Image (cartoon, helix red, strand yellow):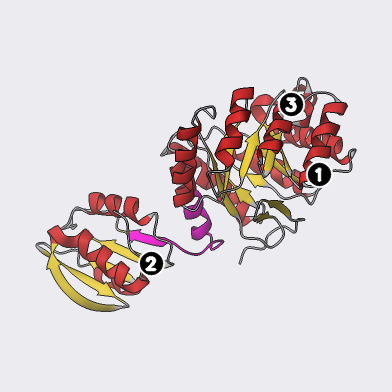
Amino acid sequence: MIERRKTRPVKVGGVVVGADAPISVQSMTNTITEDTASTVRQIKALESYDCEIVRVAVNTEPAAKSLKRIVGQVEAPLIADIHFDHRLALASLDAGVRGLRINPGNIGGKDKVREVAAACKDKGVPIRIGVNSGSLEKGVLEKNGGDFADAMVESALKHIKLLEDESFYDIKISLKSSDVLSTVRGYELLAEKVDYPFHIGITEAGTAFSGAIKSGVGLGILLYKGLGDTLRVSLSDDPVNEVIAGYHILRDLGLRTGGVRLMSCPTCGRAEIDIVNIARNFEKISARIKSDISVAIMGCVVNGPGESMHADVGIAGGKEKSVLFSGGKMVGKFDNSEILEVLLKEIESITGEKIKI
């Protein structure tokens, strides 16, 4: 049983981050925010995979104007990602965003921080202090002997103080590096000093393949240690895959329920069906299934029947025909060409969900 760190709660729209709230999954659009239609389309795609919070880049005045149109067309609470220009933060708040991601140290002087904090307080909008190892303020890394973890913590504490000096405490914090161990150590150190909720992630993690592995390792360590209240899996890929990966990580640690838990054999010379493509095609379809259900797709008679019986629904592959198991019992045989169709039909029967293909 994982025991989570005790933190104060922060509300991002209707999503509570921290305290005893479920660890939320978020992503960030990669569209040009000025392109309202494309950005709305991508946010709706993220929503269809249960993305709970969406962040958008607001780096120009046209982007801030577009944001006002975007907010009215989507359901997920939006966070505006702001750097350098506090006026964009104020415009984003006026547009109706439910969170800001800023570095108080690069938003301007104390007067600018005061103005943004006052506007956030007035609208009940939290601020995430986002510290990245690649954009630390000048001199802090050298001061800490090149140690990214220590440098990120010092930077975070400095930025926290800027907001606390304005009596603003509706804060989330992230310390992100592309190095897993620096990221983990940074969060460990900061957890000893503050009780603000943590947004966790491994930044610039990589592609859908390498990035998911690195994120799984880093986030898995942090979550096992109880550190993390909301997360983003950062991938050079379709943002939808960030959401899918995030839920997989949380489910595998027992921190979220719901959705498909897929077991598929790694294949060997005994496999008598095309496990790789069947499992791959099923995984794409199953990402939208919301019911908590275990599914086994197995390729031979050695482990296939046992694993399939232990799952809610399972396929044990054979040379020409495969066997369908449901609720621990064999319920039928069918041609291998029908595997995916039969599997989905049985899942629909059990869950009552209409599965989109």
Residue 124 image position (x, y, % from top left): 76, 48
- Tell me, yes or no, whether the two marked residues, 2 and 1, touch with CB atoms within 8 Å: no
The amino acid beneath tag 1 is Asp
Q: Which residue is mark 2?
A: 294
- Tell me, yes or no, whether the two marked residues, 2 and 3, touch with CB atoms within 8 Å: no
Residue at the spot x=61%, y=54% of the render?
223
Residue at the spot x=76%, y=45% of the render?
123
Disc nearer the start of the sequence (2/3): 3
How far apart are the alpha carbons under marks 2 and 1? 46 Å
Q: Is residue 324 magenta?
A: no
Q: Which residue is mark 3?
A: 87
How far apart are the alpha carbons under marks 3 and 1? 16 Å
- Is residue 150 depicted above or below 254 in this figure? above
- Is residue 83 depicted above or below 219 in this figure? above
Identify the magenta region.
246-263
Q: Secondary structure at mark 1?
A: helix
How far apart are the alpha carbons under marks 2 and 3? 49 Å
Q: Secondary structure at mark 2?
A: strand
The amino acid beneath tag 3 is Arg
Left or right of residue 236, residue 128 in this image? right
